[in-house]
Image: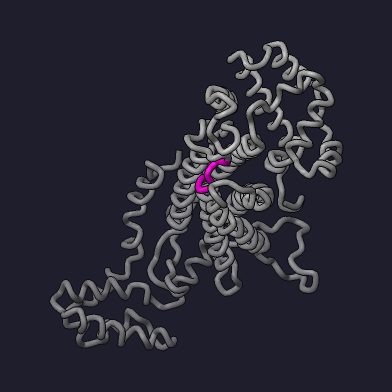
Amino acid sequence: MIPRYSRPEMADIWSPETKFRIWFEIEAHACTALAELGVIPKKAAETIWERGNAAKFDVARIDEIEREVKHDVIAFLTHLSEFIGEDSRFVHQGMTSSDVLDTCLSVQMVRAADLLLEDIDGLLAALKRRAFEHKDTITIGRSHGIHAEPTTFGIKLAQAYVEFERNRERLVIAREEIATCAISGAVGTFANIDPAVEEHVAKALGLRPEPVSTQVIPRDRHAMFFAVLGVVASSIERLSTEIRHLQRTEVLEAEEFFSEGQKGSSAMPHKRNPILTENLTGLARIVRMAVNPAMENVALWHERDISHSSVERMIGPDATVTLDFALVRLTGVIDKLLIYPETMKKNMDRLGGLIFSQRVLLALTQKGAAREDAYRWVQRNAMPVWRGEGNFLELLKADADVSAKLSAGDLDALFDISYHTKHVDTIFKRVFGTATAS
């Protein structure tokens, strides 16, 4: 987690100050529940809340205590006792460290997920706006990097839209999965704390009680969460890679916005490089880097140890902060993306009509030609054009086998570009529920 790729809202979730504030709230909510059960005095619970809310936790002081006691939760509780006083003896009654650590992590991951969902909503809005803007902007569709058949730039953006819609649904499920609370004590049996305490804390923090915590919340939940973050990052990379390809000098159908005074190269003043989408490609790798360790955290010794702890202290902040930054950056790229319809048309015309080869093939079969024969006839006229020799339509008209099945007028009609865009409205209705921009 470095400032260059961090936004304050997400970084704050993982700050020591936020963490210790959540720790206090977990302990204080537990005290409230214990007071209601008659385990501790109600006045003590009130004092804990009052003095804890007024306190500013001293991170340096907690670190100082931890250097001596070698235990972060004990260090925090010791610091807490310094301003709560005598009633601090009622804090952490029947609880174990993982109750605090795991419940806090759940709160942080839920908050992070909420921010990421907002980010995706912003990206979806930008993709939708630009998709409708270029719904009918005809461009070449490529497969294997080679010209295939016409599509529209709006369809390309609509495809990205539905991909991130799926990602949003996945993240909602992952958020739900991670939103659990464990206040069950050592080995998770509630031997020294009533399950009602867990229920109270969970409700107060917007979580659900973990059915069986075994002291720690099962890490399959966390693995699922980070796996979804990895999928979202991969979608970011997919769209970024497409934009990078489109900005190549030989293609130049779209490019990142280049602001006044911006410089693309320290050596070559003419350069306009796709630096943002290259950056996004790299950031996606950082997010995915968290997935495998999260999977390996699932298996703990005898159901409970802390081998997962060091991992999560790093991948929790790093993956969410990086993905938050990446989603917002991608939104900006899409929002300001420069799109060049004239270049798209020029590129599409480079193959001299070869993009209509499938339509000619199908028309020949519909006129009675065997598919293998039709394929051979079309291909033998296509290959010279591929080498820059002649015009595809004229060669087809001059081919005896083709002309025996299709007239010159038939062939002319097969080269109508609008044939390939006749179902654009259908696609947009499937994606957006309408074919018209609101």
Q: Position of residue 108 (x, y in %)?
A: 63, 38
Q: Residue furthest left?
A: 368
Q: Viewer-proximal residue, 147 or 396? A: 147
> Measured along the vertical axis of the image, is residue 422 above or below residue 173?
below
Residue 216, how many percent across, how many down? Answer: 57, 41
Is residue 336 among the parts visible in the rendering?
no
Per the picture, the main secondary structure of the magenta-coloured stretch is loop
Question: Quick check: 298 left or right of 87?
Answer: left
| Coordinates of residue 395 in the picture (x, y in percent) | 31, 85
Q: Is residue 47 left or right of residue 138?
A: right
Q: Residue at x 76, y 18 (%)?
A: 87
**Residue shown at 54%/49% (left/top)?**
302
Residue 219, magenta (yes or no)? yes
Q: Nearer the viewer, residue 422 or 165?
A: 165
378 relative to 308 in the view: left or right: left
Regarding residue 44, the answer to whether it shows in the image is yes
**Rendered residue at 32%/82% (across/down):** 394
* Horizontal side, residue 399 vs residue 314: left or right: left
Total numbered labels = 0
Give the farthest residue toward the front.
Answer: 191
Q: Position of residue 205 (x, y in %)?
A: 59, 28
Question: In the rendered view of the protein, which quadrant contains the C terminus?
Answer: top left
Confirm whether the magenta stretch covers residue 213: no
Which region of the structure is painted magenta? 216-221
Q: How is the image coloured?
A: one colour
The residue shown at (60%, 52%) is 330
